[in-house]
Image: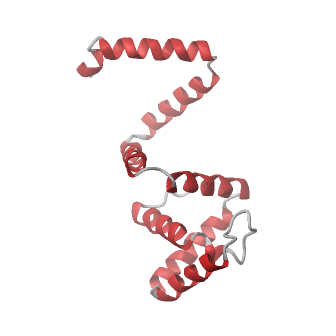
Amino acid sequence: MKIINKKSVIFLTAFLFIAGFGLVKAQETTAYGVDDKEEYKQALEKWKKMSPQEKQHVREIHKKWKKIPPEKRKEIIDKYKRFKNMTPEQKQKIIKANENWKKLSPEQKEKIRQNYQKWNNMTPQQKQKVKKNYEQWKKSGQAKKR
């Protein structure tokens, strides 16, 4: 899948957040759209105010959105809802982590994915031991030398 550039992500995020998925309502089930008619009306008003270029951009994003499996779309919407309810500090932390992730090489990202998979396969006791070792490593000053 093609990675969308930062401007597209910001635009898509803004569109989905502001519109509240209202513009997609006609083609989506209520599980993926909005149930509030007022919210839909507001989204429609925002659509009417968009430039032709913005509308075309939204259409292109919508085509990509429709290619995403329904389960994945629901997951994206659920993550959006969690993000929407976060404090500004929590949101900033997520944004910063995303910016850091984009700076990593493909090899670094793959290593992180492998470590994450290992972590998920650990028992609670193994995780506790890793956490303890990490805390000891931080306190030893080795973390500052990196």
Comparing 87 with 17, the one in front is 87
As drawn, the residue found furthest toward the right would be 29
- Residue 128 position, x and y percent, is 53, 15
Q: Residue at x 60, y 83 (%)?
A: 41
Give me the residue at 58% from left, 23% from top.
118
Up the image or down, 120 lies above or below 88; here it is above
Residue at left offset 74%, top offset 67%: 30
42, above or below 68, in the image:
below
Viewer-proximal residue, 79 or 6? 79
Q: Position of residue 141 (x, y in %)?
A: 26, 14
Colour scheme in use = secondary structure
Q: Position of residue 103 (x, y in %)?
A: 36, 45
Q: Is residue 26 left or right of residue 135?
A: right
Residue 109 location (% of width, % of height): 46, 37
- Quadrant in the picture for the N terminus: bottom right
In-image side of 111 versus 89 (left or right): right
Numbered circles on residues, count? 0
Which part of the image, by quadrant, shows the C terminus? top left
Image position of 6 with respect to 110: above or below? below
Residue nearer the viewer, 20 or 59 = 20
Is residue 141 placed above or below 21 in the rendered structure?
A: above
